[in-house]
């Protein structure tokens, strides 16, 4: 967990960002404010990132994308970089280049831009070669597969399901309640979910403890990591509410926490609070 907070300033939690390492493939999901320096604090090598996947264009999920691409200007390696996002992502990057400069689309590394429509499945191998296909068989032994699902938050917003040889990780990004999301995330071993609002939710487009509880009941993950909690609510308080209504482990996300998915189980290091 690189950034587990929201748009609002927080001394302990940066804006949304999550890193997944599967074999030699290094995947960063979202790049909210503070992500670039959060990678360094977490001991993650930003130069080794192969894929940056963006869920939608709100600043707490994308504002450090330009900073990362600027940093790559000073990394003259030949490791390919893939930018993965919703339909319309290429046009978004062109607008970003008009604002900051043409280096956005030429960050001194071989660059590929992939738009991932809901239901399409994108494969990345350890060699970081890739392809896109429809949902189907599990990924090859040394690959990960990324699939998108549209969510009720913005016109373009998507959730991600990341399949690895050791099982799947689900990342809701920002979303309101969605029956389609329940099926999409069913069977993931780790679920990283937003829970921006308390019950009853004051606005649409976000989850609350009651809707997260329903999502967990359908998805049945081994571990649920609750992130993106807006103050004045405290993540640990919402975790207590959620955990009381579900089976399985539920923890509050914390910047720098590492979650290891192994054949024998899911381990959190350092341990995160559970109710």
Image: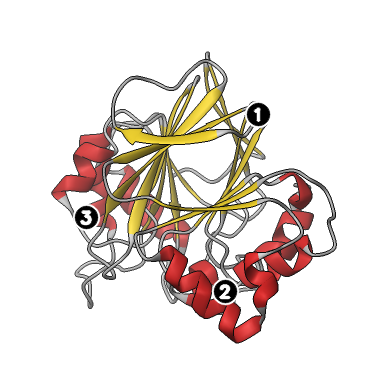
Label 1 element class: loop
Residue plotted at (72% across, 55% down): 39
Instruction: Note whether residue 6 is visible.
Output: no
Residue plotted at (21% across, 72% down): 204
Q: CA distance from mark 2 to mark 3?
A: 30 Å
Q: CA distance from mark 1 to mark 3?
A: 42 Å
Residue 238, position as x, y percentages in the image: 37, 58
Up the image or down, 138 lies above or below 20; here it is above
Label 2 element class: loop
Q: Residues within 10 Å of mark 3 (few under 14, many from 20)?
A: some
Whether pointer 1 and pointer 3 mark residues with C-beta atoms closer than 8 Å, the reply is no
Q: Earlier in the sequence, mark 1 or mark 2?
A: 2
Name which quarter of the figure residue 101 lies in: bottom right
Q: Which residue is mark 3?
A: 210
Up the image or down, 202 lies above or below 18; here it is below
Name which quarter of the figure residue 153 lies in: bottom left
Front: mark 1 or 3:
1
Q: Which mark is residue 127?
A: 1
Nearer to the camera, 130 or 158: 130
Q: Which residue is mark 2?
A: 63
Label 3 element class: helix
Up the image or down, 223 lies above or below 50; here it is above
Say whether residue 197 is left or right of residue 54: left
């Amino acid at each position: 967990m690189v950034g587990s907070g929201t748009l609002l300033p927080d001394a302990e939690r940066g804006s949304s960002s999550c890193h997944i390492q599967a074999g030699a493939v290094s995947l960063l999901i979202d790049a909210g404010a503070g992500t670039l320096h959060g990678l360094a604090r977490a001991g993650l090598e930003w130069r080794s990132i192969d894929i940056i996947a963006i869920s939608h264009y709100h600043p707490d999920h994308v504002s450090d994308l330009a900073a990362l691409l600027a940093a790559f200007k000073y990394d003259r390696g030949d490791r390919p970089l893939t930018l993965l996002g919703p339909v319309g992502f290429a046009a978004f990057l062109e607008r970003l280049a008009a604002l900051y400069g043409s280096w956005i689309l030429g960050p001194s590394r071989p660059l590929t831009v992939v738009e991932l429509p809901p239901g399409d499945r994108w494969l990345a191998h350890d060699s970081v070669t890739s392809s896109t296909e429809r949902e189907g068989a599990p990924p090859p032994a040394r690959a990960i597969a990324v699939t998108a699902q549209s969510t009720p938050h913005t016109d373009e917003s998507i959730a991600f399901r990341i399949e690895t040889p050791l099982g799947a990780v689900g990342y809701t990004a920002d979303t309101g309640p969605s029956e389609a999301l329940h099926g999409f995330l069913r069977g993931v071993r780790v679920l990283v979910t937003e829970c921006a609002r308390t019950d009853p939710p004051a606005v649409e487009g976000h989850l609350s403890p009651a809707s997260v509880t329903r999502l967990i009941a359908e998805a049945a993950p081994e571990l649920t990591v609750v992130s993106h909690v807006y103050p004045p609510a405290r993540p640990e308080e919402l975790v207590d509410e959620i955990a009381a209504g579900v089976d399985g482990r539920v923890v509050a996300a914390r910047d720098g926490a590492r979650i290891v998915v192994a054949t024998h189980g899911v381990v959190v290091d350092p341990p995160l609070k559970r109710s």
